[in-house]
Amino acid sequence: MAGTSSIISISSASLFTPTTPQPKTHCLLKHTKDNDHLPPSSFTTLSSLRISKPKTTTRVNVPPRTRRWSCSASASSSSTLPSALLFDCDGVLVDTEKDGHRISFNQTFQERNLGVTWDVDLYGELLKIGGGKERMTAYFNKTGWPANAPAGEQERKEFVASLHKQKTELFMALIEKKLLPLRPGVAKIIDQAFAQGVQVAVCSTSNEKAVSAIVSFLLGPERAEKIKIFAGDVVPRKKPDPAIYLLAASTLGVEPSRCVVVEDSAIGLAAAKAAGMTCIVTKSGYTEDEDFLNADAVFDCIGDPPEERFDLAFCGSLLEKQYVS
């Protein structure tokens, strides 16, 4: 097995002990050949593995006395680091969708007397459409435009733009009050990147002002001045199109293959992979059941010690393809 290299994403359904149920988590496993002699009691039995590369699911029966596996997503000995660490914003830096953007959309609809409310489940479906203006347009086209909306195509574009501007202002007020916290581990891994000279950027379909507010108010001004933001209408086509990630790589002066992206959604993953980049998924509230088979690694969050899921060195290890089955 020493000659093969594969990323393994394993869920709690694949790990078991006779008496204790395992928490729902994902981890990466690395075979430690030097520990083959250890007795079965020294490790957790594996019943099956879900392998993310190649794009098939393979079940491997592991004799209990032949291998010892260690669960870790840290690779502090890695000598390779990404040239750039690129983050999506909503759902990655902050879990903003359900209690941030959705609330702001609904408040805008109410203030404009549109008679529209997006509940939690409906908004989850609408998130499959990248961009707030595009999301509203698709919804109105399908369900019918409000009675007080204009009839002309250009006038409707301006109407939607005015709704989105009002919604953004309401959302920014939530962010400025710090009512929505950073997700675990975000600040930690950004600080690690800065310390190692790795460039950091945020690439989002959200409005640039909203993304800048999140970066400035929640990450702080010192970090914010070092982070490049690519957001909103900076590209003509939004995720799952790779344009925003390709623009980031070009602007930062780095090769796409040397970038590691952190995303939370299937459309974001598709954009990153189409750009030729390595992509780690940190699932969010709305995306936990989406298909992430093409991801290089999947976690529930980045995590802070002592519950850290991965670090910057691990991102570098994905570029080196060091993890083996």
Image (spheres, helix red, strand yellow):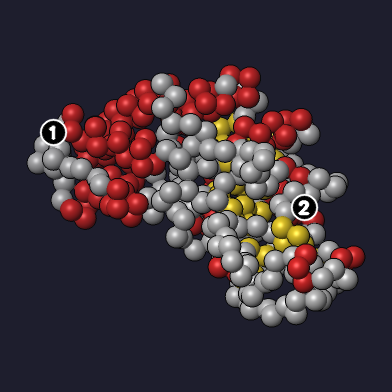
Secondary structure type for disc 1: loop
- Amino acid type at mark 1: Asn
For label 1, the crowd category at 10 Å Cα-Cα, with few meaning under 14, some 14 to 19 and many 20 or more, is few
Front residue (pair 135, 110)? 110
- Amino acid type at mark 2: Ser
Q: In the displayed structure, would residue 14 be above or below residue 219?
A: below
- Residue 317 disc label: 2
Nearer mark to the viewer, of 2 and 1: 2
Q: Is residue 234 left or right of residue 186?
A: left
Residue at horizontal 21 percent and vertical 48 percent from the top: 140
Q: Are marks 2 and 1 in contact (CB under 8 Å)?
A: no
Q: Quadrant of the N terminus?
A: bottom right
Marks 2 and 1, the one that precedes in the sequence: 1
Residue at horizontal 76 percent and vertical 30 percent from the top: 195
* Residue that lies at the very extreme toward the front in this rendered image: 19
Question: Can you identify the residue that label 1 sits on?
Answer: 113
For label 2, the crowd category at 10 Å Cα-Cα, with few meaning under 14, some 14 to 19 and many 20 or more, is many
Residue 208: percent from left, percent from top = 46, 31
- The answer to whether residue 24 shows anywhere in this view is yes
Residue at horizontal 34 percent and vertical 25 percent from the top: 169
